[in-house]
Amino acid sequence: MHSNSSYNIKTAKENVKITSGKTAVFDDKSGDTGKAIHRHFCPRCSSAVFSYPDVDESAAFVKVGALDQAGQVKPKAEIYVESALAGSLPNKSQVGKLTSYEGFMAKEVERA
Ligand SMILES: [Zn+2]
């Protein structure tokens, strides 16, 4: 199952620092990479905060919506374009250069 848009920043795991509190973790093994993604949530309101994928153990994916300056983030890539809901992909003429991939960056593809 795919949800609609999720905006994430890929960064090095070492850049993620929890300064107070603790996250709750869901070890999601349903992904198509065959490896788990450890999804960290706020334990009080269940907001997704960041994920650590086993497929790239040095990486973290931070939820843009969890950032104070989320509006300053410019998208650079989109993934799972083959299964996007109709009309849900960004308009490239509005967001600028955007690399498109099928799957979890499995294959780069062109789309209008
Ligand atoms: Zn919360």
Image: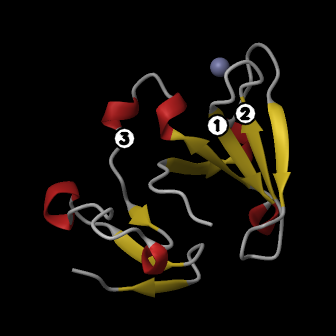
> Which label sits in the foreground, 1 or 3?
1
Q: Secondary structure at mark 2?
A: strand
Asked if marks 1 and 2 touch (Cβ < 8 Å), the reply is: yes
Q: How many neighbours does mark 3 have within 10 angstroms: few (below 14), some (14-19), or many (20 or more)?
A: few
Q: Could you tell me which residue is drawn at 82 percent across and 21 percent down?
A: 22
Q: How many neighbours does mark 2 have within 10 angstroms: few (below 14), some (14-19), or many (20 or more)?
A: some
Mark 1 lies on residue = 48
Question: Percent position (x, y) of residue 64?
Answer: 48, 39
Work out whether 18 lies above or below 62: above
The quadrant in which residue 29 appears is: bottom right
Q: Quadrant of the C terminus?
A: bottom left
Disc 1 from disc 3: Cα separation: 17 Å
Q: Secondary structure at mark 1?
A: strand
Mark 3 lies on residue = 73
Q: Residue 41, which numbered label?
A: 2
Asked if marks 3 and 2 touch (Cβ < 8 Å), the reply is: no
Q: Look at the image and name its color scheme.
A: secondary structure
Q: Could you tell me which residue is drawn at 57 percent across and 77 percent down?
A: 103
Disc 3 from disc 2: Cα separation: 21 Å
Q: Label 3 sits on what residue type?
A: Val
Work out whether 27 lies above or below 77: above
Furthest residue toward left: 93
